[in-house]
Amino acid sequence: MGILKMEGVSKSFDGNQVLKNVDFFVETGEIHALLGENGAGKSTLLNILAGVLQPDAGSITFAGKSYHNPSIKQMERAGLAFVHQELNVVNDLSVAENIFFNRELTYPLGLLRKKEMLQLTGELFATLGVEMDPAQKVAELKTSQKQLLEICRALHTDAKLMILDEPTTALGNDEVEHLFSILRKLKADGKSFIFVSHKMPEVFQLADRYTVLRNGEKISTGRVADATPLTITTDMVGEKYAAKDVYLPRVFGEPVLELEGFSGQGFRDVNLIIRKGEVVALTGLAGSGASELMQTMFGALPSSGGSIRVSGEEVRGGIGKFMRRQVGMLPTNRKENSVIPDQSVLENEYLAEHNLSKAKLFINRGWETNRYQALKELLGIKAQNPGDAVTSLSGGNQQKVFFARWLNTDVDILLLDNPTQGVDVGAKEEIYGLILALAGQGKTIIINTLEIPEIKKVSDRCVVLYAGDVVAAFDHDDINERDVMLYSTNAVNAEKGK
Ligand SMILES: Nc1ncnc2c1ncn2[C@@H]1O[C@H](COP(=O)(O)OP(=O)(O)OP(=O)(O)O)[C@@H](O)[C@H]1O
Ligand SMILES: [Mg+2]
């Protein structure tokens, strides 16, 4: 008898059927990967399970009991915990208050037992090996810490089955390892997990069984040990899949970005010359400073020393200054943008500014719509009509819209912070093709990413940061998983120091 049995589940939104008679079974004590392209229906199925959405048809049996249109509370009480695709922490509260959110410990008169909650949170972190201060304000945490906090909160409810909808998108490689070790430990205690991820190596590292959805239908299910990345990918995308190598060596133009002794929050003394038409990857684990470096190159964070020249001229100041020199940036993850209010304002602000400096975006509605249609097709954006709220799109489709937005402008230098995060395998290939096509037209592209296969696919050069320093640079032919990892984990120096 498994922990979960969902049978014949169907769901439509405004006449658009996104789940078609889906069966989904999870065994007790397993990690079950739920897979599928962006918009396949994964989050919708899980929202139905958790009582967030009502299905049009179908049944749910969880921990031996049947449920018909259950409420969120009912499922929580039955032992289900859900870590949603978008972050759900309360920024104004402390870490401990978030752990006990809605389940606060109180004295009879309703007074909070603060000391006890702090202490219990400390104990929880100790057993999980998580380093976080229970008294800290959540607003001060990095996105990766917020994500870990949210997972800890779910673990703390002592749930039987835990849903993790893309839990690793905001985590660095070392944090992912840490999370996986926690999950394996809990699995050994008999807990069950549903795990959603677009990263195939994670699935093969962690999951026992898998189910693939495509266009709202269940396509396959089985043991991960009996499958290969290729069989699963083929199930996910159907016939259209072709893993093609798109990289071609190119000739670069004059230097367009010159960093000299460039320093800022989290990185220092970076010297880098990037030429017109070049694709350069920045990479490093959480805390390496790679993302901060990129944000400072766009004026989104202040620099504290050295200089940056764009097309030969030194630029000082904020985003507006860089945009006027034809620099654009796709900021990192939706999760962050949706939880940190000032960041989404910032993003809107520079988009607005860009629109002002490029009045033609306003003039020709027909041109705009055609362009939107072309990008929509190219990236495979699943959206009913352009007027829909972006929040009605699946997570990955939202990311594609953000990406399309930048392709829609004609900047010379494009900074992409983690552009394929949460994006499915087919669209990833499209994005790689686009990056190289843009570079072929003379655009200069800097991409910050943790995915080494992605770096190999698109970049002419890879710059590795560790703890704020540039520790290595590889030309395209020399980029390989092992060497990049050796430098980004600083294993190179650990070896020397032995
Ligand atoms: N509230 C909603 N209103 C209208 N359409 C919706 C709503 N929620 C989801 N959809 C649509 O249902 C389909 C399935 O979305 P879902 O979020 O389940 O996809 P997903 O498999 O989780 O994708 P991703 O990997 O991108 O997160 C998509 O086409 C999406 O646009
Ligand atoms: Mg989803």
Image: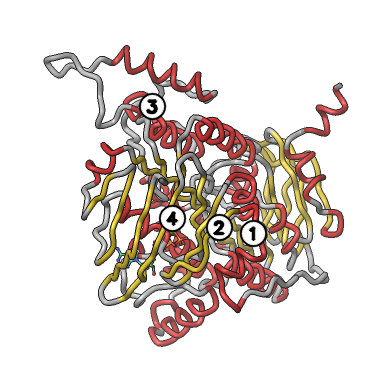
For mark 3, give the secondary structure. Answer: helix
Specify whether residue 404 is in view. Answer: yes
Q: Amino acid at mark 3?
A: Val
The correct choice, above or below, for 116 with respect to 388 in the image is above
Kindly identify which numbered label has been placed on residue 347: 4
Q: Earlier in the sequence, mark 4 or mark 3?
A: 3
For mark 4, give the secondary structure. Answer: helix
In the rendered image, which residue does mark 2 sit on?
222
Q: Nearer the viewer, mark 2 or mark 4?
A: 2
Kindly identify which numbered label has been placed on residue 227: 1
| Residue labelled 4 has its Cβ within 8 Å of some atom of ligand 1 | no
Q: CA distance from mark 4 to mark 3?
A: 27 Å
Specify whether residue 448 is in view. Answer: no
Q: Earlier in the sequence, mark 2 or mark 4?
A: 2
Q: Amino acid at mark 1?
A: Ala
Mark 1 and mark 2 in contact (Cβ < 8 Å)?
yes
Q: Earlier in the sequence, mark 1 or mark 3?
A: 3
**Quadrant holding the C terminus:** top right
Q: CA distance from mark 1 to mark 3?
A: 40 Å
Local crowd size for mark 2, using a 10 Å CA cut-off: few (<14), some (14–19), many (≥20): few
| Residue beneath the point at 48% across and 81% down | 371
Q: Position of residue 86 (x, y in %)?
A: 40, 49
Kindly identify which numbered label has been placed on residue 95: 3
